[in-house]
Amino acid sequence: ATTTLNAPQSQVDALMSQVADEAGLELNMDLPTGAETAIGSSTKASQEQDELSQRLAALRQN
Amino acid sequence: MNSPAERHYKTLHTSHARSFELISKALKLDEGSSDETKKKEAISLYKKGLTELEKGMALDWRLCPPDKHERAKSLIEKMNGNLRATRGRLSDLEKQYAVKNTAA
């Protein structure tokens, strides 16, 4: 916890960005660009529908 | 972009977007209050959302462009799940408020 508090936000951001870039590069090497886009789009709309289903289910349990 | 397959996919996506907007609004009212007026507004929004979901269910992922088959199929499945969840919640609310309506 102490380490986290002492780390400057800019350094944390830079590290997060670096990790994301590295993961992105690895994904690009494994997947054709089209496939990656398709997965991204499908996830957003599908996740939104899932989110509604979960909230509705939660209300029914009350 | 304007091929029948593209239009079919666009219709599906529109149905998703509209149902999401309507049911999100209904949920905010439904979750946030036990006020009868708000519950009734929520019932009306859930019904509109259901109509949009039903439009989506009438579509076929196989008629979408081949590169969109997977996401269309997945979206239709999720919308179908949401359709059942919405019908269930709506039926609860209608039972709860039907009693008060007949009494009034």
Image: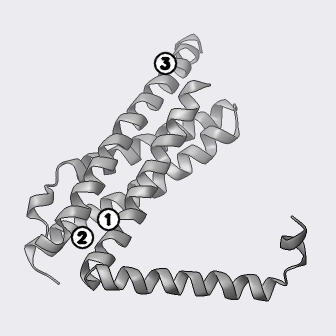
For numbered disc 1, what is the local secondary structure?
helix
Taking the spot 85% from the left edge, 80% from the top edge, the residue there is A7
Quarter that holds the C terminus of chain B = top right
Find the distance from the CA under tag 2 to the CA under tag 3.
36 Å
* Picture residue at 57% right of the left edge, 32% below the top: A59
Q: Residue furthest top?
A: B103
Q: Secondary structure at mark 2?
A: helix
Q: Is residue B16 above or below residue A36?
A: above
Which of the two discs, 1 and 3, labels the residue nearer the N terminus? Answer: 1
Residue B11 falls in which quadrant of the image? bottom left
| Relative image position of residue A25 (x, y in whole percent) | 42, 87
State yes or no: discs 2 and 3 in contact (Cβ < 8 Å).
no
Q: Which amino acid is tagged 1? A: Thr
Do marks 2 and 3 share a subunit?
yes
- Residue that mark 1 sits on: B14
Among the two numbered marks 2 and 3 on one chain, the one whose residue lies closer to the N terminus: 2
Q: Which residue is under mark 2?
A: B10
Mark 1 — on which chain does it sit? Answer: B
The answer to whether A61 is drawn above or below residue A50 in the figure is above
Identified at 32% across, 85% down, the residue is A29
Secondary structure under badge 3?
A: helix
**Quadrant (top left, top right, bottom left, bottom right) of the N terminus of chain B:** bottom left
Q: Position of residue B33 (x, y in %)?
A: 70, 37
Residue situated in front as seen by the camera: B4 or A55: A55
Cα separation, mark 1 vs mark 3, equals: 31 Å
| Amino acid under disc 2 | Lys
**Residue type at numbered disc 3:** Lys
Q: Is residue B89 left or right of residue A43?
A: right
> Do tags 1 and 3 sit on the same chain?
yes
Which residue is disc 3 drawn over? B95
Q: Residues within 10 Å of mark 1 (few under 14, many from 20)?
A: some
